[in-house]
Amino acid sequence: MSSIIKLDNIVKKFYIGQPNELEILHGISLEVEEGEFVAIVGPSGSGKSTLMNIIGALDRPTSGNYFLDGINVEEATDSELSEIRNQKIGFVFQTYNLIAKTNAIKNIELPMLYAGVDRIERRKNAERLLELVEMSDRAKHLPEELSGGQKQRVAIARAMANDPAIILADEPTGALDSKTGRLVMDLFHKLHKEEHKTIVLITHSNELAEETDRIIHIKDGTIVDITKGGDK
Amino acid sequence: MLLFENISLALTSLKSNKMRAFLTMLGIIIGIGSVIAIFTVGDSLTIYVSQSMQELGANDVYVMVTQRENSEQSSLNRMNLSSLTTGSAVDEEDYISVQMINDMCEKFSDEVYAVNAQHQIQDMATAGIENKTAKIGLMGTNAGYYITNKLELTAGTMFSEKDYSEKKKVCIVSSKLVEKLFDGDSEKAVGKEITVNLSNRDEIFTIIGVYNANVRTSSSSNSGMMMVLSGATTMYIPLKTAFDLDRKTESFYFIQVITNVGVDSSQLASNLSKFFESYYRNNRNYTVGAFNLSGMVSMLTEMLATLTMAISIVAGIALIVGGIGVMNIMLVSVTERTREIGTRKALGAKNSSIRTQFIVEAMIICLIGGALGIVLGMILGSIASNALGYPANASIKGIIISLLFSMSIGLFFGYYPANKAAKMNPIDALRYE
């Protein structure tokens, strides 16, 4: 098995050269295998959001190497970073971040639109993904007409749109009640098992982390422990 | 990203904020609307003026008696009440004589095709047969008159050479007069003698022709307002006959010189001015001026163009203010949609895609505003044209320019907000509350 994510001694500093210079990540090295379901756990302020931004190609590390599916991310231009996010990463946010006034199926089509997929192909793929997340009957609904759980399922379908190398989920159940949160977690397991997706779950909940293959514990900008998750 | 997707995105965004979109468009609507209204009125006016000039004969030269500047008479005139009331203090001895016209025709035989000379008898007259009467205005004309004022005869003939030279008492009457006196039977009227009652005596005329009074000729502008109001129609008689009737020597305040094809009428006008000046060398108060219409037309068109330009500048300022409004609302929109922009970037939108999205939105606002402005402008322009009495002419040129211009306003004023959106840091944008 090959590494999809390869972080090598990643350091991230803010306010570089100013008196309040701040080092958030102190040299993180981590590898995630293809088809793995890992959790990154840590209390708030531990630097897990910063790490997520780097893994998600939203930000560049100050030093260190990051290879995503064989691509050297820190050498990429802004435009290439956009392409990496578009092709390699599927984001799932705590607050869903669906585009308002735009119906479910069009939201799912959006990453494909930016990828330049033609209209018929887009629609076909979006319909398949809606079926995968069991939301076919809500295709034409606007985000404001959907419940939190439904919104998150649409968001997960959107993350799958360009068949990314990894799905990066930032507290995906954080805004949901435990019952709908459960359904969303089940969906991730389904994507992991049936679609063989590599999933990186960022959470502060040890309980959810226990469901994954491997748990990476972060504290004060360093990996303090890596444990094997309970098999669900 | 595809243009179509951007347009549909922009429309979705506008629909969700209808009132705001409309208020933003208002500046553009007013700006474009006034430009179109001005263009419509301007074009209508230009077309109308040049058409009527063409009808009158833009290539003809008008020769008329004019007052000399700084003449003694003119300063006296200001104190002379009678001249103010009659409107003219020109004596008949100052008029253009037949001799002068004959000399001119001889000297400029290559240029002059014909001369239109006319003599209107001021008295209100009635024409009658048996017990029936009709009001008429008597107009003495020469053959040249009918070259520029074509009559459509429904019966009979035009005047012959003999009618003119022998001062025959023949006339051509209007179809309206025939309706009153001959129950509308034109054929029956021809050859009949009718009695023309001038202020103090009767004269007998033979009808030789009937013209269709419903066909508007430029001659109808010669018939004064009083004539139209009283229901009188023009009765044409030979020129010399008219002077005889008035007991006046044949002389003219105004003549129209019809030129041969290919004659430079501006050149002829200045030559004629010099020619007539020789007759008026000893006249301290009056001379004769010659003008051609094409000069007047171009002067008028130039004046109109200047006016259009001046109002267009004002409208242009309105458009700039409107454009600033668009920019303002786009900045608000970009700030409001910071999270959306962050999300789009996380999903792989390039800076250029975001920029295009917002520029297209600004251009759509301006384009819709422009289209509404064109409709508004055309309505206002038509109303104004009709009120001025000219047929409205929509300016295609104006419409195309306005649409292009409003789109460029969108592009220009939309660029800065769009660029602001494009340059947002995705992390900060995603975190924006």
Image: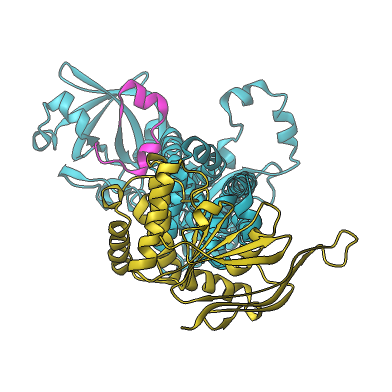
- What residue is shown at x 59% (from left), y 31% (from top)? B88
Out of B181 and B314, give the one closest to the viewer.
B314
Residue B416: x and y, percent? 65, 57
**Chain coloured cyan: which letter?**
B
Q: Is B129 displayed left or right of B379 in the figure?
A: left
Image quadrant assignment for residue B275? bottom right
**Rendered view: A116 above or below B161:** below
On the question of residue B396 being in view, the answer is: no
- What residue is shown at x 72% (from left), y 43% (from top)? B69
Q: Is A97 displayed left or right of A103 in the figure?
A: right
Q: Is A184 displayed left or right of A48 in the figure?
A: left
**Rendered view: B317 above or below A23:** above
Residue B157: x and y, percent? 18, 47
Magenta stretch in the rendered image: B213-233
Residue A76: x and y, percent? 62, 78
The C terminus of chain A: image quadrant: bottom left
Out of A120 and B264, give the one closest to the viewer.
A120
- Magenta stretch encompasses residue B91: no
Out of B140 and B310, give the one closest to the viewer.
B310
On the question of residue A195 being in view, the answer is: yes
**Chain coloured yellow: which letter?**
A
- Magenta stretch encompasses residue B222: yes
Image quadrant assignment for residue A123? bottom left
